Image (spheres, rainbow, N blue to C red):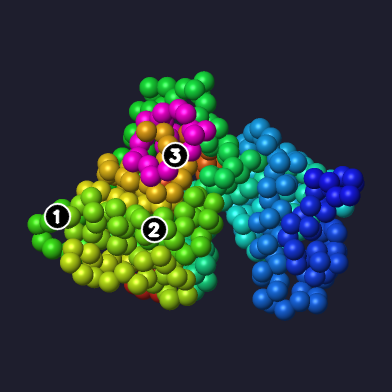
Amino acid sequence: MEEKGRKIGVLERIRLAAGRSLCRLFGIETAAQFKKRRVSGATATEWREAAEKLVVLSMPSLLDEFGGKDVDFSPSLAGTGVYGYKYQAVMRALPGVTFVENSETKPDYCFFWGFGRSWSNVVSALTCARTGGIPVLCEDSFLRSADTWANTNTPPQYRQGCSVIFDTRGFYFDATRTSTVELMLNDRSLIVTPEQRAEARRLIDRIVGAKLTKYNHQPIFTPEVGRPGRRKVLVVDQSYGDFAIRKGWGSDKTFADMLEDAKRENPDCDILVKTHPDTMTGRVLGYYDNVKEEGNVFRVTMPINPYSLLEVVDKVYVCSTQFGFEALMAGKEVHVYGMPFYAGWGLTHDAQKKHARTNTRTLEEVFYIFYVLYTHWVDVKTGSPCDIDWAIDNLIAIREEYAAFQKTGRAGNGA
């Protein structure tokens, strides 16, 4: 990018792209300056808006300039890193990395947790732009904890995550870029052996049988919803404006089309519209908040484990949610209206097509690549890296402890 014949560096591109960004608000150029002045001269609203704008708009430039590296994120990975939000999960998965709040010398890695507006993500963005450290994108995987990380009324051992994903190319849910997991799924030379497929099937059966999902605080029961004796189709809502939608080719129209198609294609079935858990609090909007129960349309608003709900439906319509992959694992027919990582490989009925996805994969292959090769697992009791089976064992035990805590108010020993 050039302006008046002058080549513009990454940091200047960030400042130009972000508009009224933190750099402009605070007049800063380095992470050290930002840390000292992160709340100076701006209201809380300006801070949140500017922080998110800077991180979201700077990410493509940082990844294009310094990312795209094939890093072996094994527990023995060594080097220095500037950490991002939820850094403890990163430190537990990568004990060989030395983390510092900020480095005046070039760090090897600059870690980001999601597209979050946290000040540590901004520190990582500014440090990455200044030093050229490799940007590493971090996210929870699909099995995480007993309760959500945000429920601070719950003891920490029930909120501690057991999985984390690392990527230097893009987030797994971001269809606007090519993530490492998309490259792996599209790579015909990456052969999942018969033994690995059998292992994937064993793990799928174990997860579905135990009804394990990302957050495991929702009750397990057989729901009575809709009309007795009618086949049921599930349409899954999501949090309005979530990045998995914005980056996963979703929109208001996507959700409107999804519901209309579900009703048109299944006139003799009950259409169950599943509310997103975050919208139940009233603090987050959903796309189907105004959908009314009429005719064969029924709303599912009660907290319920996803696999309990999947047991009573035959077909599932989703945009970009994890629920769609869990539905595949449970053996359901899945119609996808966004572009999540599991779409486009021949497993789902897709309303959109990403032409770069040219390979086909079985469910077991997609599971093995995402859950075993791509996801990193952590023993929440010891804080050390572990394998997926060990993480599942721990998650089952922690869920049982959590259920007892909910009844008695007494927490177990935890991690």
Amino acid marked by disc 3: Lys
Q: As rendered, which of 254 and 191 lies closer to the eye?
A: 254
- Residue identified by numbered label 2: 255
The percent coordinates of residue 131 (x first, y second) are 83, 47
State the residue position of label 3: 353
Q: Position of residue 41 (x, y in %)?
A: 80, 77
- Disc 1 to disc 2, how far (Cα)? 21 Å
Q: Earlier in the sequence, mark 3 or mark 2?
A: 2
- For this orientation, the residue located farthest to the left is 229
Magenta region's main secondary structure?
loop
The amino acid marked with disc number 2 is: Phe
The answer to which quarter of the image holds residue 219 is: bottom left
Q: Is residue 361 visible?
A: yes
Nearer the observer, 212 or 224: 224
The kind of secondary structure element at disc 1 is: loop
Nearer-the-camera pick, 397 or 75: 75
What residue type is disc 1 on? Answer: Asp
Residue at (41, 55) in percent of width and height: 254
Q: Is residue 257 left or right of residue 45?
A: left
Number of numbered discs present? 3
| 367 displayed left or right of 101 | left
Q: Are marks 1 and 3 in contact (CB under 8 Å)?
A: no
Task: Determine whether the residue tagged by mark 3 lies in a helix, strand or loop.
Answer: loop
Contact flag, marks 1 and 2 (Cβ < 8 Å):
no
The residue labelled by disc 1 is 268
Start and end of the magenta stretch?
347-368
N-terminal of the two: label 1 or label 3? 1
**Image quarter for residue 125?**
bottom right
